[in-house]
Amino acid sequence: CSAVTCCAGCPGHLLRWLPNGIMGRRTTKLLGVVAPMILAQPGGNGGMGGGNPHFECPDAGGFAGDSDYIGKGLKPIPVRGNVGCVDAGPLATRPTVENRRGGTRPATNIYGPMEAGFTSENHECLGDVVVPAGMDTRLAEAMLHAIDGCEGREILDFCGGHATPYHYHEKMSCLYEDDATTGHSTRIGTALDGHGLYGKHVDGGVEPDDLDACGGGGGVTPDS
């Protein structure tokens, strides 16, 4: 792994995409995040490239990984689209979210940090300005705030997700809690390579300070 690109098969077993994001824990290898500035293709209504080019997660949970990634060693993951899915337990606490027209959307998809870009179709305050694709969520939001009239706008909801198809980018704080005994965050979902994704705390209820270049480290999970 490098500071630019992380991939399935990197050493360690913790994943954290953003400072307030999530971590995935496993026994030998890490599913990481592809982070180069690659422009996404237009489409969908979650941004300039809001459509999901990878797959839709099961509405009832039960995702066990993708055969293209399980046991395949070093392999890049999508810049856009799913890097994992929410497990059935956490999904039961928030199975759907409301859309702008009053309907609901499944809240099952977990993406990496990269945004697909925004136009006035997403935030009318942008006018003719475009927030380009290929930015992580925090940079994209900072660029949005730099536009007159867009100050204070948020691109993600309180749990770190947005768009159609609805997908989480970070936080996911509404889907996990800290284990009462160890303080370690509970499991949120399953990554493409079949291993678990967890909340941001390790034993003791603290954020880790010993992650490797891919956000990996060691330790024991509540469901180990």
Image (cartoon, grey):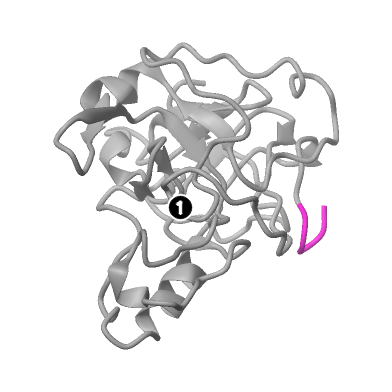
Instruction: Spot the residue most to the left.
Output: 102
Residue 220 visible, this orientation: no
Q: Nearer the viewer, residue 145 or 71?
A: 145
Instruction: Spot the residue most to the front.
Output: 128
Q: Main secondary structure of the magenta part?
A: loop
Relative to residue 79, is residue 107 depicted above or below?
above
Label 1: state its secondary structure: loop
Residue at left offset 44%, top offset 48%: 200
Q: Tell me where residue 123 sits by quadrant.
A: bottom left
Query: How many numbered dots are placed on residues in this image?
Result: 1
Location of residue 207 in the rendering, given as x and y in whole percent from the top left corner: 45, 56
Query: In the image, 41: left or right of 181?
Result: right
Q: Which residue is mark 1?
A: 21
Classify 10 Å Cα crowding around label 1: few (below 14), some (14-19), many (20 and above): many
Residue at left offset 46%, top offset 11%: 62
Location of residue 122 in the rendering, given as x and y in whole percent from the top left corner: 36, 59
Q: Nearer the viewer, residue 53 or 217?
A: 53
Residue 190 visible, this orientation: yes
Amino acid at the residue labelled 1: Gly
Location of residue 114 in the rendering, given as x and y in whole percent from the top left corner: 58, 56
Relative to residue 70, is residue 102 depicted above or below?
below
**Which residues lie in the magenta part?**
1-5
Residue at left offset 52%, top offset 39%: 51
Location of residue 151 in the rendering, given as x and y in whole percent from the top left corner: 28, 81
Q: Nearer the viewer, residue 142 or 94?
A: 142
Q: Is residue 123 magenta?
A: no
Query: In the image, 122: left or right of 63?
Result: left
